[in-house]
Amino acid sequence: MSQIETVMRTSPVIPVLVIHDAAQARPLAEALVAGGLKVLEVTLRTPAALDAIREMKQVPGAIVGAGTVVSTEQVAQVKEAGAEFIVSPGLSTKTGAAILEADIPWLPGVATAGDIMRGLDLGLGHFKFFPAETSGGVKALKALAAPFYQCKFCPTGGITEASAPDWLAIGPVLCVGGSWVTEGTLPEIEARARAAASLGR
Ligand SMILES: O=C(O)C(=O)C[C@H](O)[C@H](O)COP(=O)(O)O
């Protein structure tokens, strides 16, 4: 099994995290891991993100990756911070080449057949379907996945606790990504994580 498939099969939900203060990173990771979600995606949308990755990696059991990686400079930064996987909103061959060279498991975003074919050209078979709901939802991914029967997906974007089961019921969907689990206080987040971790695939 490829490394990215192992990451995708660890939990049914990957929390997508936007962290503004690195001091909040460790307690947040502890709550999510305690709830059963070990795979954590820290988006590079804030200046605190790289420090947040370093902090979260201190939490036993956490598998910490970097999200929103869109440039070769960021690839070097997240490698240095110790990211265990990388998620990108799209699939660029330039950034992709840097990620493959860095040998970090990668989940690039796709929304079209052309995107997937560029991924196949790079030797990839695991993709984020993004933005999932506005790209046509469950019906669109089912139609897209059919000819690419060998590919696996992590839909992300607009998914909620209520809609996650519909996505997870699609055969090639190994997990979904979402920010809904990170809403509320730490005890609420732990409870949301527990509910998300118990979703079936
Ligand atoms: O930052 C990135 O790299 C992204 O690709 C965007 C995130 O995946 C979505 O923002 C999460 O979607 P929501 O669960 O709808 O909040």
Image (cartoon, rainbow, N blue to C red):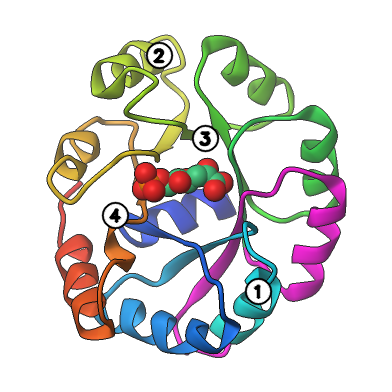
Residue 47 appears at what percent x and percent y?
A: 70, 68
Label 1: few (<14), some or many (≥20) within 10 Å? some
User: Residue under circle 4?
Assistant: 12
Label 4, secondary structure: give it: loop
The mark nearer the N terminus, 4 or 1, is 4
Label 3: few (<14), some or many (≥20) within 10 Å? many
Label 1, secondary structure: give it: loop
Q: Nearer the viewer, mark 4 or mark 1?
A: 1
Q: Is residue 89 visible?
A: yes
Q: Is residue 14 above or below residue 127?
A: below
- Extent of the magenta region: 58-84
* Residue at image coords 15%, 51%: 200
Report if the CB atoms under discs 2 and 1 are less than 8 Å apart: no
What number is the disc on residue 127? 3
Q: Is residue 130 above or below residue 14?
A: above
Report if the CB atoms under discs 4 and 1 are less than 8 Å apart: no
Q: Nearer the viewer, residue 195 or 135?
A: 135
How far apart are the alpha carbons under marks 2 and 1? 36 Å
Residue 90 lies in what quarter of the image? top right
Label 2, secondary structure: give it: helix
Residue 55 appears at what percent x and percent y?
A: 60, 86
User: Residue under circle 1?
Assistant: 48
* Residue at image coords 37%, 30%: 132
Label 3, secondary structure: give it: strand
The mark nearer the N terminus, 2 or 4, is 4
* Residue at image coords 30%, 18%: 142
